Image: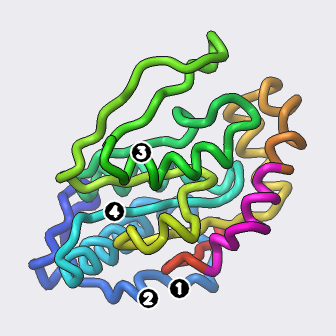
Amino acid sequence: MRESTDPVDPADPADQVDPADPVDPADPVDPADGEGLAAGVAAAAAGAAAASGGRLVVLVDGRSGTGKTTLGDQLAQLLGAQVVHLDDLYSGWDGLRAAADAVVRDVLGPPSGYRRWDWVADGPAEWTAVDPDLPIVIEGCGAVSRASAPLASLAVWLEADDAVRWDRAIGRDGDTFAREWDRWAAQEQDFIAAENPASLADVVLRT
C-alpha cells in the first residue's frame, strides 16, 4: 500500500482513482482519516491531469472553518505541488472578491504570482512568484469560480455545519476573527450567490 506521504503517480495502477468518484460525497469526512481522504482526492486530481495532458491544478474552496488549508497542504505534499493560500491574497477583511479575480488573472495567468497582503501592516507586501510549469494547489474561499473552474484538473468544495465552522475558525484565529466573522461571512455569501462554487466542483465533501 502506498504511504500517504508518497507522491501520487498517475501511471501507477495503485494510484488510479475515478476522478468522478474519488470519495463518497454523501459521507462526512472523518477528521481522523484526513490523510486517507487527501490521498483519494490527490489520486483523482493526478488522474484528471494525466487524462487531459495539462498542468495539474487543484482548487479547494469552502467557507471559513471547513478545512481548506489542511486539505490544501496535504494535497500539495502528496502531489509535489506548490500551494497558494488565499489568506495571503485577501486585501484585508473586504478582499475576497479581489482575491478570487487574482486567482485567474495573476496566479494562473501570465504573471504567475500574486501580491502578498501583510495583515500586520494592513497593506500590500512583496510580489510572490509561482512556477507556471509545476503542479499547483490553490486553497481558500474564492478559489472556485466560473472563471477558474475550467482551468482546474480538479475543483473541490468543502462544507460543514455552521457551529462546527465557528468552533474551528475561532479556535484557530481567536478574537480577531470573531470580531470580523459577520463581515467576512457576508462576503462569502455574496461570492456563493454570484458563483455557486459547489455546482462547479468535481468533488463536494462535508467535513
Amino acid identity at mark 2 = Asp
- Majority secondary structure of the magenta segment? helix
Q: Secondary structure at mark 3?
A: helix
Amino acid identity at mark 4 = Val
Nearer the observer, 53 or 8: 53
Residue at which label 3 appears: 106
> On the picture, is 51 further left or further right than 153?
left
Q: Nearer the viewer, mark 2 or mark 3?
A: 3
Where, quadrant-wise, is the C terminus in this rendering? bottom right
Q: How far apart in space, not on screen, are marks 2 and 3 (Cα)?
A: 31 Å
Nearer the observer, 93 or 162: 93
Q: How far apart in space, not on screen, are marks 2 and 1 (Cα)?
A: 7 Å
Who's the residue at 56% across and 51% down the image? 101
Who's the residue at 36% across and 38% down the image? 113
Residue 198, by quadrant, is bottom right
Tags 2 and 1 in contact by the CB under 8 Å rule?
yes
Q: Which mark is residue 21?
A: 2
Position in image of residue 150 (x %, y %): 43, 74
> On the picture, is 122 further left or further right than 170?
left
Q: Is residue 182 magenta?
A: no
Vertical order, 183 against 139 (above or below): above
Amino acid identity at mark 3 = Asp
